[in-house]
Amino acid sequence: MERDQRVMVLGQDVGRLGGVFRATAGIQERFGGDRCFDTPVSEAGMLGTAVGLALAGWRPVCEIQFDGFCYPALDQLITHVGRYRQRTSGRAAMPLVVRIPYGGGVGAPELHSDSPEAYFVHAPGLKVAVPSSAADAKGLLAAAIRSPDPVVFLEPKALYRVAQDPVPEGDHCLTLGTARIARRGDAVTIITYGAMVPVAQVAAQALAEEGMEAEVIDLRTLKPLDEELVIASVAKTGRAVVVHEGPRTLGVGAEVSALLAEHAIASIKGPIVRVTGYDSPAPPSLLEHKYIPSPERVIAAARRTMEL
Amino acid sequence: MSQELLEIYRDMVFLRVFDEEWKRFSHMGRVGNVPLTWGLEAVYAGSMRALEAEDWVFPSYRETSASILRGVPAATVLAMERGHPGGWWDPWSHNVAPPSIPVGSHVSHAVGYAWGTRLAGLPHCTIVYFGDGATSEGAFHEGANYAALTKAPVVLMCNNNGWAISTPVSRQSAAATLAAKAEGYGMPGVRVDGHDVLAVRDATAEALARARDGGGPTLIEAVTVRTGAHAAVDDPSLYMDQEAVERERSKDCLARYEQELQDRDLLDEDTRQRYHDEARSITRTAMQEAEALEDPLPGAILGSVYAEPAATIESSGQAFQEERR
């Protein structure tokens, strides 16, 4: 916000409270109520207002309080935000960001534990980023804010109070569309993102102890997807497991599997296995551990890729 | 003064002739199913006359043709209705946003734009058009609420023509008037006779002046009665009472204004004829121009979706190229 006077924050309780997760703490004090604006309880209205603000030259960063409350905003994202640039022959950019704390594992009530990423990935015109570490949260958010395209930025809330990695000082901006190899290996590729990255790493550690070196790919952005890195890794290992919290059918795992079937079929030596949430609403918190992929499920899936 | 009155008349004639012409074009298959504006000329010509050049307009689909009054070329509008990407105009070239096809969800765009310009210290105002049906959408409510909260310099222009396709306004809302909704948002609500072009102009001018002075938004309900089809492809005889239609048609805003000008000796038959001929000629030439556009290139499908497309989008483009081989 210091770097670019056009950046402004919008959201419920983002001002004095600093957001329900304190992600915007101190911003209103520092930049004033106009650049850190407490909106009414109105997700669709906020996104619509952000469209107009973007047309007026601002770069709105909108906060949705919880994943399950983003659905009213889907109307604006699908019917307008992702289409505006084309509708104006490329003249009107939509440089806005929608930050959404997402995912389960924090023992919250209904509609506080959803993984809605697939809806955004499927909507043309949007980009989708999901950090898995504090450093990436900074680098990807900077990239999202500076992007001329609209970016949905999903923050794994299970990692809010867990990620302990050092945050780079000063300017730190990643490139949207560039995945990261979180662990190197040659026996199987585990492709994942967000809160499932640490789960995959625990699984990879256990597999290594059995003598199976897994490569873990942290996608970082789901759209654009770093297809090259994913294909290259699976071409090397010949085996793939895709892990995500969101429901299975037509989730990111389905897209990655299709991508590998189209571009890496000659290298594939076993079934591509998805480890995902189920086709049910995210369950009540006492059942979450049965829904959210666990290291055990990832390990079993990695073994299954060997079965052919 | 009398010059302005004639210019308003000319705008109304243009909209009337354009509407009749593009309805015909639609039935001939030269454009798609276009929204009709017969009887709304006073609402559009009156309100747009009150705007300054730098003010912005956020049209709904029904104001696509009225955008021509703000300078959008008629050929561009007709290209859009042909389904040609050449119809995607640059909002900044005439300060007109792209028409919103979904009902009501553009209200907050106008509010955000107006608020954003005020935050940036710019002097201009914004007007957003929507119909009676849009007031039933949650998006209208959220937009109006934001407008009042941020004191955005915006005029919410509700064109209440009595019908949302076949649903009468009485089945749209139990409120006594749509303007009455303004009170709930904490903004002034004004009801104006939408058949009276000068009354619409004055009500809009007043709302714009208040907005420019920092007084925030106004909801204007311009009341008209639709007596024809919703769009070129629609059969109003299925839902409208023909006797009532005839009665209402006699209250036509254009005939009424024409009479007013003639009574004041401001309009002679030659001028009247000239405006009609001119409008017809502009419209027909524009249709020919829109049809003379080269066939759109397939590149327009993916070309302007992202500023920075990157891999995924490019690979969907690759599939697109391969399938065309």
Image (tube, coloured by chain):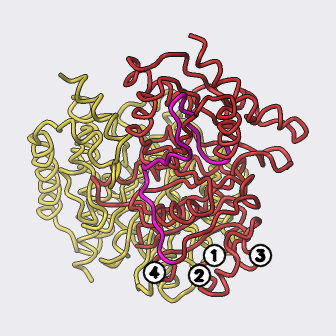
In whole angstroms, how far apart are the C-alphas of marks 1 and 4?
19 Å
Q: Residue furthest right?
A: A286
Q: Colour of chain B?
A: yellow
Residue B79 percent coordinates (x, y): 21, 44
Q: Which residue is mark 1?
A: A37
The kind of residue on which mark 2 rests is Asp
Where B221 falls versus A88 (above or below)?
below
Mark 1 surroundings: few (<14), some (14-19) or many (≥20) residues within 10 A: many
Q: Quadrant of residue B288?
A: top left
User: Residue B70 appears at what percent x and percent y?
Assistant: 28, 66
Nearer the camera: disc 2 or disc 3: 3
Looking at the image, is mark 2 or mark 3 earlier in the sequence? 3
Label placed on residue A3: 4
The first of marks 4 and 3 along the sequence is 4
Residue at 44% in and 34% down: A233
**Circles 2 and 1: CB distance less than 8 Å?**
yes
Disc 4, SS: loop
N-term-proximal mark, 1 vs 4? 4
Which residue lies at the image location 36% right of the left edge and 41% below the top edge?
B313
Chain under numbered label 1: A
C-alpha span from label 4 to label 3: 24 Å
The disc at residue A17 is 3
Chain that bears disc 3 = A
Question: What residue lies at 75% left-to-right and 58% top-to-bottom?
Answer: A162
In this figure, which residue is indicated by the disc labeled 2?
A: A34
If you read the primary sequence from the N terminus, does the residue marked by circle 4 or circle 2 appear first? 4
Amino acid type at mark 3 = Leu
As measured in the structure, the alpha-carbon distance from the residue carrying label 2 to the one carrying label 3 is: 15 Å
Boundaries of the magenta span: A170-196
Residue A49 lies, with reference to residue A111, above or below; the image says: below
